[in-house]
Image (cartoon, rainbow, N blue to C red):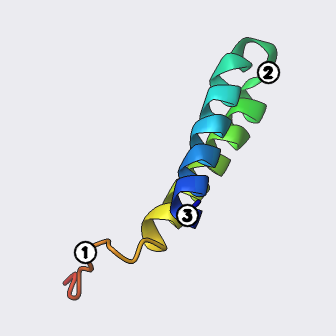
């Protein structure tokens, strides 16, 4: 299985786990869980070799 697919499955799993336990957690715990998902997603985006690159952002 490709690393990208494993990462997508991990992100999906974390999101489902976070959403399903939302009523049992306080706001800080939920925010931390969602922030972890954001970092995982950013890693997936930045490590994707097929992602188009923006060379000049100015």
Callout 1: SS:
loop
Q: Are marks 1 and 2 in contact (CB under 8 Å)?
A: no
- Up the image or down, 2 lies above or below 56; here it is above
Res 25 → quadrant: top right
Label 3 sits on residue:
2
Q: Position of residue 8 (x, y in %)?
A: 54, 50
Q: Which of the pair 49/42 is nearer the observer?
A: 49
Question: Disc 1 vs disc 3: which is toward the camera?
Answer: 3
Viewer-nearest of labels 1 and 2?
1
For the view shown, which residue lies furthest in the top direction?
23
User: Which secondary structure, mark 3?
Assistant: loop
Residue at point 59%, 55% (across, down): 7
Earlier in the chain: of badge 1 and badge 3, it is: 3
Looking at the picture, how far across and down is residue 46, in whole percent? Answer: 45, 71
Q: Earlier in the sequence, mark 2 or mark 3?
A: 3
Compared to residue 24, the image places residue 57 above or below, namely: below
Q: Quadrant of residue 14?
A: top right
Location of residue 28 with respect to 57 vertically, above or below: above
User: Dot 3 surroundings within 10 Å: few (below 14), some, or many (20 or more)?
Assistant: few
52 relative position to 41: left or right: left
Front residue of this view, candidates 54 and 57: 54
Q: Residue at x 68, y 18 (%)?
A: 20
- Residue at the location (73% across, 11% down)? 23
- Residue that badge 2 annotates: 25
Cα separation, mark 1 vs mark 3, equals 20 Å
Find the distance from the CA under tag 2 to the CA under tag 3: 33 Å
Residue 21 place in picture, x, y as percent: 74, 19
């Amino acid at each position: 299985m490709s690393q990208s697919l494993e990462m997508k499955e991990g992100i999906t799993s974390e999101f489902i786990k976070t959403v399903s336990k939302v009523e049992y957690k306080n706001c800080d715990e939920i925010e931390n869980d969602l922030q972890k998902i954001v970092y995982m997603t950013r890693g997936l985006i930045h490590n994707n070799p097929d992602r188009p690159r923006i060379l000049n952002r100015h």
